[in-house]
Amino acid sequence: MLTTPFRKKGVFRHEVAGRLPVYRFDQLSNDPHLAHAVFTRLGGISRPPFASLNLGHTVGDDPTAVQANHTRVYGALGIHGSQAVTCHMTHSADVLLVTAANKGQVAGQGDAMVTADAGVYLSMRFADCVPILLHDPQRKAIGLAHAGWRGTVKDVAGAAVRSMVNQLGCSAQAITAVIGPSIGRCCYQVGQDVIQAMEAVFPQETAQAAVEDQDGRLFSRRNGGYAYLDLWEANRRQLEAAGVGRVIVAGLCTACHADFFFSHRAERGRTGRFGVVLGYREQA
């Protein structure tokens, strides 16, 4: 049986679903009809460097293996691939409104999807970028976003929340947001282009003023003065600015744990993508 060693009491736990190790978050598990899972890189059939549960179709892996991995993922949740909806991610702040009519399709280009339709499962792929899971239990609505540094600069997290409010009738205060496994400040060394882009969005932050591992700051400096960026904190601030009632940060770095998660940075760009799936089950 495949397992992973990470737990965070009151935040997330690891389980085994359909022989696949998955992570589930306590605050998203209160609704028995809400299905969600963060998958790892374990339990698939892809060969190195995509070993083994690669869900990325565009990274150079064997398409047959990728499709088999998708089948395993959806089977672990007790659903079929024809119920899933995905999108072509472009590091944007574009949000796609998904309905039952989109099931089994690529909904379009965007970096966030939202829906209030039961039986629709939002599915996205990651390898260091930040997964953001959104849930309004009152409206029974969900959202899933993909935030790299470009998407964070464009406030994709806030855009997804506003879409849920404006298009689905959600209350921002009722939304719980989960920031899933992604590259942490410990590993995310950035260059001047990223620093300048982030400073423009967060003018109170400067990499020059940062010190080593100071909590609550976007930048830290170490190893000869290089700047390290905290995407978790940046997205947490944007979610709170959008009015989200609760933000939960997993605090699990994919680059530190590239044996369990695909990491574009740790594996120098030659790697796969792990999956996140979120959706409401149809009630009988």
Image (tube, rainbow, N blue to C red):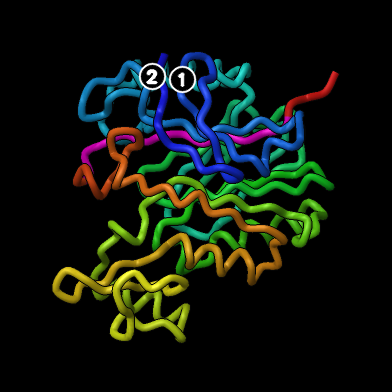
In terms of image quadrants, where is residue 121?
top right
**Residue at the spot of label 2:** 43
Q: From this viewpoint, is residue 110 visible?
A: no
Q: Position of residue 35 (x, y in %)?
A: 66, 30
Q: Position of residue 142 (x, y in %)?
A: 69, 44
Look at 62% across and 36% down and name the residue there. Answer: 278
Look at 45% across and 47% down and name the residue there. Answer: 89
Query: Gap between marks 1 and 2, in whole Å?
Result: 6 Å
186 versus 127 height, above or below:
below
Residue 128, numbered label:
none
Tell me the element at label 2.
loop
Q: Contact (CB < 8 A) between labels 1 and 2?
A: yes
Comparing 160 with 94, the one in front is 160
278 versus 228 height, above or below:
above
Look at 63% across and 53% down and name the residue there. Answer: 177
Quadrant where the image shows the N terminus: top left
In this rendering, would 234 be left or right of 208? right
Q: Position of residue 53 (x, y in %)?
A: 37, 24
Q: Residues within 10 Å of mark 2 (few under 14, many from 20)?
A: many
Q: Read off the magenta span.
A: 269-280
Tell me the element at label 1.
strand
**Residue at the spot of label 1:** 20
Q: Amino acid at mark 2?
A: Gly
